[in-house]
Image: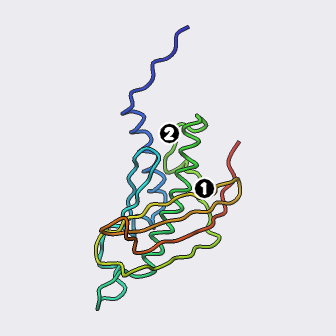
């Protein structure tokens, strides 16, 4: 019995990175906010690059609370979407090469999103990671933490509940 040769790991990584890139580029607001995502295995880290337009109080200066909330919410939504997409890719239901801007999965819709502002967001890059607490067919709960210099000292955290899109098939 002849089994096909497995693809090189680098090829698989490039396809997954391409699928993540297509997912992120499918939301123009993410680019406007200067948010980027890096992937290590199935873990995503969001980075919001510092930009003067993100400052809410120029006297301090401090990041605008709306920019912080948007950053955390985008991180949660992309984490949920990537988790669904990753599962479908791993199960062979979706070919990662087929994921492009014209064939993106639908994004979860926010039911509610509560942000805790723990300290002033300084005028520098910010990072965030989301943890999916529960994800079912219809509903998901996510916790997000955002930090700047020290991951152990978050400047904001959030909890969100989302309506999950129907899966095909």
Quadrant for the N terminus in the image: top right
Assign a secondary structure to mark 1. Answer: loop
Residue 140 horizontal side relative to residue 127, left or right: right
Quadrant for the C terminus in the image: top right
Q: Quadrant of residue 92?
A: top right
Instruction: Pinpoint residue 44: horizontal percent, then vertical percent.
Output: 44, 53
Q: Residue at x 43, y 39 (%)?
A: 15
Q: In the drawing, what numbered circle is on residue 106?
A: 1
Instruction: Pinpoint residue 111: horizontal percent, then vertical percent.
Output: 65, 70
Q: So how many labels did they put on this image? A: 2
Q: Residues within 10 Å of mark 1 (few under 14, many from 20)?
A: few
Reply above or below: 152 against 1: below
Assign a secondary structure to mark 2. Answer: helix
Q: Residues within 10 Å of mark 2 (few under 14, many from 20)?
A: many
Instruction: Pinpoint residue 120: horizontal percent, then vertical percent.
Output: 36, 82
Residue 138 horizontal side relative to residue 98, left or right: right
Q: Residue at x 49, y 51 (%)?
A: 101
User: In the rendered image, which residue does mark 2 sit on?
Assistant: 96
């Amino acid at each position: 019995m002849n089994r096909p040769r497995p693809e090189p790991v680098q090829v698989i990584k490039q396809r997954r990175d391409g699928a993540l890139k297509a997912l992120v580029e499918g939301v123009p607001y993410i680019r406007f906010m200067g948010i980027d995502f890096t992937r290590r295995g199935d873990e995503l880290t969001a980075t919001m690059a510092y930009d003067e337009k993100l400052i809410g109080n120029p006297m301090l200066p401090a990041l605008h609370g709306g920019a912080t909330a948007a950053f955390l919410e985008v991180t949660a939504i992309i984490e949920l979407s990537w988790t669904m997409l990753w599962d479908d890719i791993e199960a062979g239901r979706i070919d990662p090469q087929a994921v492009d801007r014209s064939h993106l999965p639908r994004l979860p819709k926010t039911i509610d999103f509560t942000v805790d502002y723990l300290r002033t967001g300084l005028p520098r890059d910010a990072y965030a990671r989301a943890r999916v607490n529960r994800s079912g067919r219809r509903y998901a709960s996510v916790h997000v933490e955002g930090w700047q210099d020290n991951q152990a000292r978050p400047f904001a955290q959030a909890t969100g509940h989302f309506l999950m899109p129907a899966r095909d098939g």
